[in-house]
Amino acid sequence: MCGIIGISSNKSVSASIISSLKKLEYRGYDSAGIATLFEGKIKEVKSEGRVDTLEQNFDLKNLKGNIGIGHVRWATHGVPNSVNAHPHSSDNVSIVHNGIIENSTILKKYLIKKGHVFKSQTDTEVIVHLITENLKTNELEEAITQTLKQLHGSFALGIVFKDIPDLIVGARRGSPLAVGYGPNENYLGSDSYALKSMTNKITYLEDGEFCIIKKDQVLFFNEDGTKINKKILELSSDDASYEKGDFKHFMAKEIEEQPNTVKTGIKEYVDKPNSEINIYNFPWKIDEINSITLIGCGTAYHSCLMAKYWFEELTQLDVSIDIASEFRYRKNRFKKDKLYIFVSQSGETADTYAALDLCKKNNMKTCAVVNVIESSIARDANFVLPIHCGPEIGVASTKAFLGQILILYILALKLGYLRNEINKEIYKEKIKDLQNLPGLIEKSLLVDNDIQAISSTFNEAKGSMFLGRGFSYPIALEGALKLKELSYVHAEGYPAGEMKHGPLALIEDGMPVVVLAPRDSYYKKTISNMQEVIARGAKVLLITNKSKDEIVSENIWETIEVENTNDDLLPFLLTIPLQKLAYYSALKKGYDIDKPRNLAKSVTVE
């Protein structure tokens, strides 16, 4: 959550900070602010709401200074308003912060006794006063190390000082932070996306490290204050991916990009001439792995659940899945022959990273399935499988979900073949089907008119359900999540067979229910479950695949048919109309589709 930018330059920085904050709004957009140093004073401008609101502030037009920090907020402590917006400043220090200070209440009491006066409801303001206090008796570096040791919790920090006007301090524990390099100026940012318009040369801070940034120099230190050297990475240039083009929203663009992103993913892992899957540099022997645990949050968790079905279908490995936020608080029984797979779009998801860190401390085998290969999870895992989707800006994940399940399917298929648990003929046939998938996704995208007509019914209902069995169940969960995220309509995903065990009580006349019933081995059972909800007055939207066989059911409200393929790959096609349903439902309500309320793209707090 929260976006941070800092610039030390030989020219005015406020316009560049505003530009970067607009790129960072996917990290938080309930308030925003900037602080610069000018003529020996800290100048601060903050506002509730979006960066556009901040930009209209009269004081911003007069905000001068060659050193500055900026912030977009996703509120944790304190309601979203201009007082709680970052930066937070004392007479001497100004700070932007991403994360949560868990011992802020204790520190606040200590600082109040020292005479410090607090203005906001935030935990961040504690850091301002703590550094101010520590600077009374320490030089800069000692004051920073002392302050960081006193803070419990997670943070990425950008700090400027009235009495040391030529530098910015950055510090990281648990939340991502990057340094960028430019001519006569250097940068601090919560990720490379905010910095990419200014530089492609990046260094990432690791946990416990801090840095001192000047316009012509960057110094790095470990948690004890000892100077260290860091590598500079050069990022590729793909600026076009960050623009909406002719699309009204990034989400619409990203839904339509899915045939190409899936094609790219297949190209990266499948040798087409030889019908072979190539997963290079796999660091373990195949007989060293006898079980798998898949770990993720939100949409990534649904990817894990989808993968569990595939691993069980294609291998004889023991497979379990875990919600990352629960994983490290249980008594896990770590096993040397288990592979832990961590799934995250951003690669910075705090709960998932914490689970990875626990596995690392227990010397477990770890694999990351991520979209950002420079991310914390990618850097810390033993092995990385990138999903190659390119930047995803819309907060509600679409193309990254398909990218995640694609790579997890490819891995399951390869492991099944290497373990001799599927034969060569089936393996080759499934690879052939996989290569046809992008074209089938492209055809399945042509459902806009049908979905637009249907979406009003979901908006008008007080709730809806999404049902599926087997491979379709994780997709039902994902469809319900998308509708909740974007339209703020209560929606629940269930295994279709579970309806009679309680949820059927919620069905009432006219309630919309999405039933995912492709013509797979679960089809007849799912249709029977569908009849149970129709009999109780539900309006059923049936999503199935094209077939010569008639649908063996009556009284269906609406039907949408996707293209046909083997059972393994039908989840990819079933996902498309559910993404469109959420999109058009939100569009009709006039909601902010790319930035739904209370949510952020990169969840970097627990």
Image (cartoon, rainbow, N blue to C red):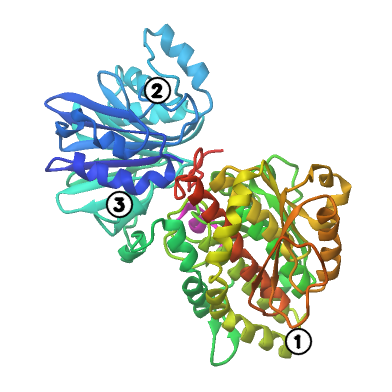
Q: Is residue 547 magenta?
A: no
453 vs 138, left or right, is: right
Secondary structure category for the residue under label 2: helix
Q: Position of residue 487 (x, y in %)?
A: 55, 46
Whether residue 194 is visible here, answered yes or no, is yes
Whether residue 142 is visible here, answered yes or no, is no
Label 3 is placed on what type of residue? Leu
Residue at position x 67%, y 80% from top? 565
Checking the image for residue 423, the label placed there is 1
Where is mark 2, residue-wise?
A: 125
Residue at position x 42%, y 21% from top? 126
Contact, CB < 8 Å: mark 2 with mark 3?
no
Label 2 is placed on what type of residue? Glu
Label 1 is placed on what type of residue? Asn
Secondary structure category for the residue under label 1: loop
Pick whichever, 553 or 436, lies toward us.
Answer: 553
Checking the image for residue 195, the label placed there is 3
Q: Is residue 134 above or below residue 429?
A: above
> Which quadrant of the figure contains the C terminus?
top right
Tell me which segment is drawn in magenta: 375-382
Q: Is residue 420 above or below residue 316?
A: below
The alpha-carbon separation of the residues under discs 3 and 1 comes to 48 Å
Quick one: label 1, few (<14), some, or many (20+) residues within 10 Å?
few
Q: Is residue 378 magenta?
A: yes
Q: Position of residue 314 (x, y in %)?
A: 75, 75
The alpha-carbon separation of the residues under discs 1 and 2 comes to 62 Å
Q: Quadrant of residue 48?
A: top left
Give the main secondary structure, helix, strand or loop, of the magenta stretch. Answer: helix
336 vs 214, left or right, is: right
Quick one: label 3, few (<14), some, or many (20+) residues within 10 Å?
many
